[in-house]
Structure formats: structure tokens, C-alpha cells
Image: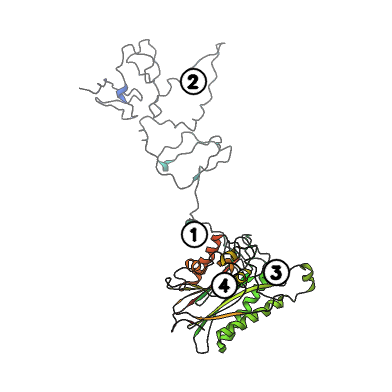
Amino acid sequence: MSQMPQQAAVSKCPSCEEPLESGDRFCGACGYDLSAVPARPDDSPTIALNGAVPPPSSAPDGVDWPVARDSDGFGRPAPVHAAAEVPGTDSGGSPLPPHPPAAPPMPSAAPPMPPGTPPVPRTAPGPAAPGVRFDHPAGPEQEPVHGPEDGREPDAYPREPDAYPREPDEYPLQAPDPRSAAAPPAPAAPPAPAAPPASEKVCVACRAGRVDDDGYCENCGHAQPRERDHMEQESGPVAAVSDRGLRHHRNEDAFSVGCTALPDGAPASVAIVCDGVSSATRPDDASLAASRAAGESLLAALPRGTHPQQAMHDAILAASHAVNALAEEPETAREQAPHQNAPACTLVGAVVTAGLLVVGWVGDSRVYWVPADRSAPPARLTEDDSWAAQMVAAGLMSEAEAYADERAHAITGWLGADAYELEPHTASFKPDRPGVVVVCTDGLWNYAESAEEMAEAVPLDAAARPLHSARVLVGHALDGGGHDNVTVALVPFPAPPQGAGSA
């Protein structure tokens, strides 16, 4: 089996000449590893493998050689001869001058220790003292001075005064301020733009910026759609939506919706829809003026006890006066557009009270009746003031042939200063079941012309969700092409107390 190597008999430490005892594997004085010392050969070599010259048992050549100096404490023997200890002569035979004293050891060398001093044990470095270390160029004589307080012997050589001002190896840090020791706060988000006052228009793109007078957002610079490009309104059970469409450069439609009460307290709902005549000047102003005048007239007359059908007739006349007033413009405006007609528009409206439905119109905008029970037939409640309607009424053309003609939408009745003799159309109905009244311009009914097509386009829950259903109908027209402005108002008709009939 494996065996440990036999230790040669050595009486003294080859490094420091400390007497040894039998069986020692390390020198008790300098810690020299004795297992590496081979048996002493008889020829006494001049230099041993470990760098030390053991003293011979006898001087074979009769010369008394000096004994080796003590080791430096790290197992390395001192030189056998120092230059100042060996006398000599120069080439002329004169004695050599004495050598200057040896320079102090380099900073990296440890000072020699006297014989018998136990070596300083090497331990793992402990935690550094709190501070920050800075690198700096070393000046002369910058060896640290050790004292008894750090467990080491003082320097063997006194230090000369520093030629350069010394800097400490470590700079202790000031105790941290507890207020700054906390985690740094997260960077604050950029402040959001202040919301504009409720009275100002808010940008439709960023929903935060104020819209300037030039129609652009002050926050994001987005151009704002014109106010009438898309309009929605809900008033009690009545709702209306108007959209510019996909082909027109502006919305020339307008509407007015509202609710009021009759003298007996019964509720009444009102819806007015107007379509500006594009071939006339300022058609958008004409439709807006007519819808406002008609709506205000109805909401004022119904609470006074005026019959709904008479109130509708009077409302159409009030709208006609409002549009006629637009023709009284300065002569400079006339000079800018002398070829255009006076402002003009069409009008259609509906009034719903308890068990009574009244409609009125001038032009080609329409009213449809769609019952809640879709098994019952729907109906169109108005007749167009148009070329196509006249051809059908005279029996000259079928309805399909008339509306296929390019002159089909040429109107024969309108509101305006240059209109022929005004003939307001009114009619009253007493439906026998609940349903919804659809009031719209030709921008919608062009894509749902018959009553059956309109009933199919109206959502089943239109009476309960009129605004949503109006949006659906506008979307139906846009999906169909959106060639014209689209406006629709929905008025739910409650369950009547009695059977239907024409008043």
C-alpha cells in the first residue's frame, strides 16, 4: 500500500539552524518544510537545492567560512556574504573603500525579523473599513509604517520625511443622510395638457386639447371635423343622427328633436328633418334655419292645446319664413353668386302623442312606419314632391321606371324664397299596435326605398334603443355608398289605447 516518504534524520533546520527533534516535519521556528530536505550527501555540495548552504560537519579545506545568516522569516535564507564583510583591494593593491550603508528595503519587502521570531500567520483578509479607495501615484518613501496596534513589528528603518505630500489610501465617507438614503423617486411623468373648460370645444383626436378658431387642436395639431359633419342627439325617447356621407364635402342636412307635454299632461314627442337643396345657395343654412324654426314652433304650440296636425301645419309655415329670410342678404353677397338660387330645403316631421301620429312634409324626405311586430306590414306615410312621384300619380310611368330615370329626384316642392305656391302636406294616423316612426332624408331611403326594405334595416329593439338604431341606419346608408348626406330620426310609438285609423 502507499506509504508516506521516510524523513531523513536532520538535527538542525536547514533554513534557520534551529535544533530539531526526531520526527519533526516542520521547523518550529521558521515553519520550514523538513520533508523536502533530502539526506545530506557526503560530498557536501556548495549550494543545496533549496538555496541554503548547510554548515559542514568539518572544514575539509581548512577555511572557516561564515555561517549563513538568519532567514528573512519567509523560508528564504539571507546571502552568505555581504559586500561590506569581505575585505579586498583594488587593481593597485590598495584597500577598497568602505561600502555605503545598504538602502532601506523596498516597500514590497518585509523587514527582517530577529532569529527565533515566529512567522506571522497568513489569514484571509477581513472586511475593508468603510470608505472609498482612490488610486494615486506613489511618491518616494511611501511605505506604510506599522506599529504595535496592528499586531506587527515597527519598521526596522526610520522613514525619511516625505518628498511629496501623501494622500490617504482611504477616505472615510460621511454618514449618509437618512432622507437621501431612501430609494430615489421615480421620474415624474410629463404633465398632461390641462383639459379645456367645458365651454370650449375638445379635440376629437387627443380628447385633451382645445380647438382654436382656425379649426385645429392646440395640443396635437389635428384638424377638427366640422361641427355638422356628424351630429347626434337624444331627447327622451326620441333620437336623431346626421352624417355628411362619403361623397359630399359638407353636411347640408339638419334636424330638431324634443319632448313636451299636452295640456292634459300626456307626453308628446317631436322630430323634424330637413335636407338642403344643393343647387341653391347656402343649403346648409337653409336646412338649419328651417329645422330650428319648425321644432320651436311645435314645442311651443302643443302645450297650449293646439291640435298636433294644426301645429304641424303652422310649423312648416314658420320654417318657410325662416328660410325666406335668408334670401334678404347684402348685395355684395348677391354679386358673388348671382347665378345661384335663393336658399332652399325640404322638410319632413312627425309628432307622436298618446295614440296619435301626425306627419307633415314639403319635398322628398320621408316618414316610415315600422311596427314592433314584424309580422305586421310596414308602411310609408308620405308622398314625395318630386318628378318621379308626379309621373307615377299621373299614370305615365310605373314607380320602378320613374325612379330609374335621372330626373327622379328633381323636387317639385321646397321651402325657399323662389318656391312656387307653398302647399304644406299633413296627415294623422292612429296605429293599432306599438312600433317606431322613421323620419329620414333621401340619403337613407335611397338604400331602403320600399317600406319592407326599411323595416328590414331597422333593428328589432329600435323602440327601446332609438339612438343606437339611428346609428345603425346611418351605417346602412354609408355601407351602401353614402352618396348623399344621411339624416334619420326615430320616434317610438307606444301601445295605443284603441284601434288604428286615419284621423
Marks 3/2: CA distance?
126 Å
Tag nearer the camera, 3 or 4? 4
**How many residues crowd mark 4 within 10 Å: few (<14), some (14–19), many (20+)?**
many
**How many residues crowd mark 1 within 10 Å: few (<14), some (14–19), many (20+)?**
few
The residue under label 3 is which amino acid type?
A: Ala
Q: Quadrant of residue 74?
A: top left
Which residue corresponds to the image point at 56% horizontal and 11% vertical from the top-left? 91
Say which element carries label 3: loop
Q: Which residue is mark 4?
A: 366
* Whole-percent x, y for residue 116 in the image: 35, 30
Say which element carries label 2: helix
**How many residues crowd mark 2 within 10 Å: few (<14), some (14–19), many (20+)?**
few
* Whole-percent x, y for residue 136 in the image: 55, 39
- Closer to the chain start, of discs 4 and 2, is 2
Which residue corresponds to the image point at 55% horizontal and 60% vertical from the top-left? 480
Q: Which residue is mark 1?
A: 179
Q: Nearer the viewer, residue 217 or 123?
A: 217
Marks 1/2: CA distance?
66 Å
Marks 1/3: CA distance?
75 Å
- Closer to the chain start, of discs 3 and 4, is 3
Confirm or deny contact between disc 4 and disc 2 (CB under 8 A): no
Marks 4/2: CA distance?
130 Å
- Tell me, for residue 280, which label it has, or none: 3
Q: Which residue is mark 2?
A: 83
The residue under label 4 is which amino acid type?
A: Arg
Confirm or deny contact between disc 4 and disc 1 (CB under 8 A): no
